[in-house]
Amino acid sequence: MVSETTADLRRNAQSIDDQLSHRPLDLDPAGYFIIYLDRPAGRICAQHFTNTIDERGLALDPETGEPIPARGKVSRTPTQVFTGRTAKEICVHLFEHTEPIPVSQFSHAAYLGRELMRAEQALLSNSDYVQD
């Protein structure tokens, strides 16, 4: 049996991730997060925004009733901003010290954990981070 090289493992993992990133998702009625890095402060930031979900499954701005675009710049004020030096620091604050927890779906919590880990890796390696 031939073992896969590290490069093969990375390539296969990336292929799996790329395929799974294109699956349909139910949006979390508790809202959504925009994750980014504040490099000068050495912090990972996660802005939380509320939304409502219409009968078509689209996220709507609760103030205007307009659909929130999936791409491009949206000018909204976050309801909360979570920051930390590590993914774990943000997750502990978000899930153990925030009431009510601004996440209502296990799939959304798992997604946040994955994205915050990716952001942490980018921060530590000084590489680019783009939220999936």
Image (cartoon, helix red, strand yellow):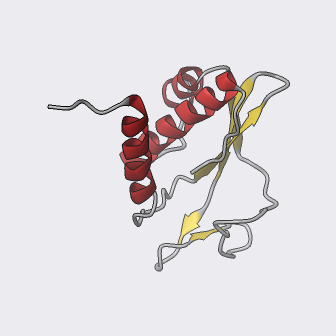
Relative to residue 84, is residue 112 depicted above or below?
A: below
Relative to residue 113, is residue 85 depicted above or below?
A: above
Residue 99 appears in which quarter of the rendering?
top right
Q: Nearer the viewer, residue 5 or 28?
A: 5
Q: Nearer the viewer, residue 9 or 21?
A: 9
Residue at 35% over, 31% down: 5
Total number of numbered labels?
0
Residue at 70% over, 34% down: 45
Residue 124 appears in which quarter of the rendering?
top right
Q: Nearer the viewer, residue 52 or 9?
A: 9
Is residue 105 visible in this depiction of the protein? no
Quadrant where the N terminus sits is top left
Relative to residue 63, is residue 92 depicted above or below?
A: above
Could you say where residue 46 lies in the image, as x and y percent from the top left? Answer: 66, 38
Is residue 54 visible in this depiction of the protein? yes
Residue 118 left/right relative to 77: left
Could you say where residue 118 lies in the image, as x and y percent from the top left? Answer: 56, 35
Residue at 57% over, 65% down: 52
